[in-house]
Amino acid sequence: MTIKIYDTMTRSLREFVPITENTVNMYVCGPTVYNYIHIGNARSVVAFDTIRRYFEYRGYKVNYISNFTDVDDKIIKGAAEAGMDTKAFSDKFIAAFLEDVKQLGVKPATKNPRVIDYMDEIIDFVSVLIDKGFAYEVGGDVYFRVAKSHNYAKLANKTLADLEVGASGRVDGEGDIKENPLDFALWKAAKPGDVSWQSPWGEGRPGWHIECSVMATTLLGDTIDIHGGGADLEFPHHTNEIAQSEAKTGKTFANYWMHNGFVNVDNEKMSKSLGNFVTVHDMLKTVDGQVLRFFLATQQYRKPINFTEKAVHDASVNLKYLKNTYTLPLGQAVDSAELAAFKADFEAAMDDDFNTANGITVVFDMAKWINSGNYDQAVKDTFAAMLAVFGIVFEEEVLDADIEALIEKRQEARANRDFATADAIRDQLAAQGIKLLDTKDGVRWTRD
């Protein structure tokens, strides 16, 4: 079996063929660090972490790059309001992001590049575009000539005639100074109070889109395997990344484009105006990070997801069931063919565009099979590997000596047919959160 990916560019399911054998070079757009991330941001982070984990499960080495945008109007404004310099302000929210996603079981990226560390590369990149005639300078601003780009907006399935100025909500520059209203800013002349850098066009700072092109190509090469991010980035951000990157290099920027779906809250689009805007930082104060991760990871990444209290509660219950299954004592050797069938079904589901909804169904079917008495070390190892794809790692629980002694005492009472004592001990253990299950293979326990 081979992994198939739904490629946004071609609107089709395509077999994954890496540029370098057994290696995945993957760039995923990260947050603009002016606030704590919200549940929509977390959905993207978790979705692509799960995809990365499955590639690793299948034996690939993954070079996983996800950036921090730390030069932005919102950062400048927020830092001024907080009485901080922009770097310290960004540092605060980068640290918060890393802590939040750690609680969500997200693996550290191979590298998290920051815009401020790539200013020389950005200036060089823009200079090449000017030299090639793809960009022009006006009063210290530099714009990309959209009309000169081959098949501009092909990713978003649009043509130049379809487009309207400001479709992104992030309009760069003033329309009356640009050759074409759709041209976008590569470099912005400094305004009073701006953080800025010296360039051939005067003091200024980069536009939004140029950052990711520079960091992706610098760290992963002119052509990368996979570029990912939220569906909202398809146009204009990823569209503009493609235009400027391919104009500079003359090569395909990314072989596969992947976009995760949106998050709704109680069936409504999440927005501050509706009062349903929830930060992960606040959510983690009341919701266990692994539960939130389980909820986000077990939905197929391209589909929209509806965040509700019931959905999170159900995730908690289901995760507890899997944990209780995982911590069962091992029994006799099982039929290896049955185990192989579960593994094959899991991989078939996940190979199909990382269909985690179907993949977790296989995991639950396997858990039911385990609970019917099929659990040896090979089963446990396979079960753990599948769970790890979803970011679920259970620590081995060890009972303290007093509880172990009570379980042994109960077993002796049952052997002596002293059921009153056995029941009393069961109740005593239940009060401590230990639930016993008597099976043909002996007593099993789970912790509530």
Image (cartoon, helix red, strand yellow):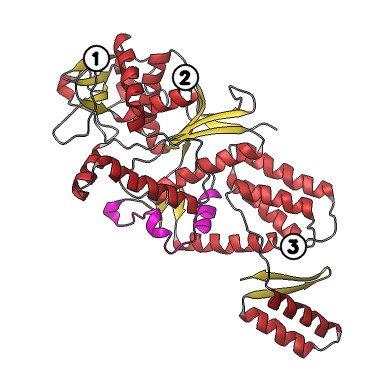
Separation of disc 1 and disc 2 at Cα? 23 Å
Tell me the quadrant of the picture where the N terminus can be found. top right
**Horizontal and vertical percent for residue 114?**
37, 34
The answer to whether 95 appears left or right of 183 in the picture is right
Place of residue 238 in the rendered image (x, y in percent of width and height, measured from the top left): 39, 29
CA separation, marks 3 and 2? 50 Å
Q: Is there any visible trace of residue 352 in the rendered image?
A: no
User: Which residue is label 2 attached to?
Assistant: 222
Residue type (three-letter) at the residue carrying disc 3: Asn
The magenta segment: 271-298
In the structure shown, which secondary structural element does the residue marked by tag 2 occupy?
loop
Q: Nearer the viewer, mark 3 or mark 2?
A: 2
User: Disc 3 designates what residue?
Assistant: 371
First of labels 1, 2 by sequence position: 1
In the image, what residue occupies the spot 66% across and 75% down? 434
Q: Earlier in the sequence, mark 3 or mark 2?
A: 2
User: Is residue 294 covered in magenta?
Assistant: yes
Verify whether residue 64 appears in magenta. Answer: no
Which of 374/121 is in front? 121
